[in-house]
Image (tube, rainbow, N blue to C red):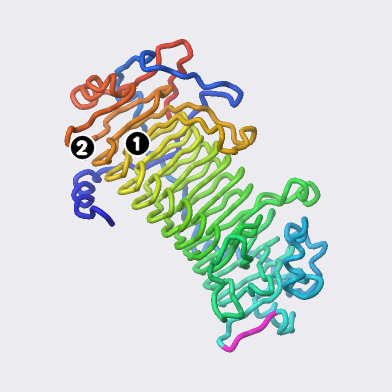
Amino acid sequence: MKHSWVLTLIITALAAGLPGANAARVSPELEPSEPAPQFELGDYDIELASSETVTKPDPAFPDMSQYTRGGVEARLSARSSKQPNVSVERISGVSALGDFVDEGRAREWVIRQFSHPQAILVNGGKATLEDVFRQVDDDRYMERNKDGSYIIRLPLVVRPGATLEIRGETLRLSEERGAFIANDSWLFVIDSTIIGWREKANGPAVYQSKSSFRPFFVGWGGSETFVLGSEFANLGYNQSKSYGFSIAQYSKYDNKRLQRSAPHAWLIESTFRDIYYGFYCYEAEDVAIVNNVYRDNIVYGIDPHDYSSNLLIAGNDVYGTKEKHGIIISRQVNDSWILNNHSYENGLSGIVLDRQSRNNVVANNVVHDNHGDGIGLYESPDNLLWGNRLVNNLRNGIRVRNSTNVGVYHNIAALNGTFGVLGQIKDLAGTGRDFEEDFYHQAVSMTVVGGKLASNASGPLSTDNPQYIELYDVDMRFPRSDVGIHFDGVLGVYQTEIFDALLNDERAVRLQPTTVNAPQRTVAGD
């Protein structure tokens, strides 16, 4: 890591005593149809208050005790032990394959299979990979290699009511023949390796380009997927639901007929590498991504998307993402937890909350040496950042863009390339965004309590004209500039009063407009 000796000194001096974290639940200040008021420097006034108006107790984290080997084994043992039924059939009419044969995509498999496309179907009962191999009984479709590993040359589907257990196995998915796995029921992958395989090269299907087919995994609506102590590698390309490792609800059109519940998954103590999206989900619920390694993936490491909720992303190492962010939740991913992750050396930011993702807690993560921000909140109000360490990121430690009612509590932001904390108002016109689906307001408001903002290149803290900003007990020592700390904008107007209140009076400071359009104060946790 760059500046390692400076970092050691700063973190040693500042890091002691960070409190725990909990979800803040705050009310939105604006309805989607309301315009955000805009303020000038002369509109603001400063208010001093006691610390009780902004401080919060340390609430409890979610119980993670179930996400263990014993928890996975208990769910597997509860599945029916009926005899497995496996067949090879044409793919037409199989719900789990519909997305891959509609709108011309079937051509991909016609070319690769040299005939009308077929798939291996686990139709019922509880099957192992050995059961599948024995019942397929055709080396053209599934073969056992001399080293005991298997290769499949057709899509493999777990149909509703069936269970597939892959335990202690290596399964290669043939790129040339268009193999992939679709779970439409129950899948357990325990102590195994699932790998995209390039038969001509007799080696892994290493990423070449976003348009080049690679095998993939998808878990559909109503499915339950459990991955424990396993590795997924060399998967995915830029086609819908083919990104690599995906957990996705069926389309509205298909689900009107199928009536499937949201898909669920537990991914525990596993490794995901060289995958187009290391993890992607769509309209998923109660997904746990716990204590995994996401390394050297292509576009994103972990990417929960579109209307997913109640997610737990905890204890993961996410690094080396080539193009974009290590961890991102985007488009109304709500009521979720991003805890105790280590996100570093990613192509853009370490952690991002995007496109109206609300009521999430980002706590106790270590985020460093990313090529964007440490943590970015983009058009995502009502979130809490607590006890994170943001160090030596190329841009800001924390960026809050077009997001209101954001709690920034007890974070360390040190040695970042611009600001420790930046509040930013930005017009997104001309970006090609669909503003009906991804509405936003050009407004910022936040509460910054505790923590250390040290030796950031552009300064500890800056914000465009906010609806409000509250400050209390914020340590801004070790400025990188020789002239010391200098605020600009509305913070600069009241710089003397701010430092007098924080350092001498030990009181909270609130800056807000005095106009009639100013929002009423909303305390995180009320």
Quadrant housing the N terminus:
bottom left
Does residue 123 appear in this view?
A: yes
In the displayed image of the protein, which residue is found farthest to the front?
430
Residue shown at the point (69%, 54%) measured from the top left:
222
Classify residue 224 by image quadrant: bottom right
In the displayed image of the protein, which residue is found farthest to the bottom?
146
| Type of amino acid under label 2 | Ser
Residue shown at the point (68%, 70%) measured from the top left:
178
Q: Please tell me how crowded label 2 is: few (under 14), some (14-19), or many (20+) other residues with Cα within 10 Å.
A: few
Q: Position of residue 26 (x, y in %)?
A: 48, 29
Residue shown at the point (48%, 45%) measured from the top left:
337
State if disc 2 and disc 1 touch (CB < 8 Å). no
Q: Position of residue 98 (x, y in %)?
A: 76, 58
Judge whether 229 appears above or below 12 on screen. below
Left or right: residue 371 versus residue 25 is: left
Q: Is residue 143 magenta?
A: yes
Left or right: residue 236 versus residue 522 is: right
Magenta part of the protein: which range? 142-146
274 vs 482, nearest the viewer: 482
Classify residue 524 by image quadrant: top left
Mark 2: secondary structure: loop
392 vs 172, nearest the viewer: 392
| Type of amino acid under label 1 | Val
Which mark's residue is nearer the viewer, 1 or 2?
A: 2
The residue indicated by pointer 2 is 481
User: Is most of the magenta stretch helix, strand or loop?
Assistant: strand
The residue indicated by pointer 1 is 421
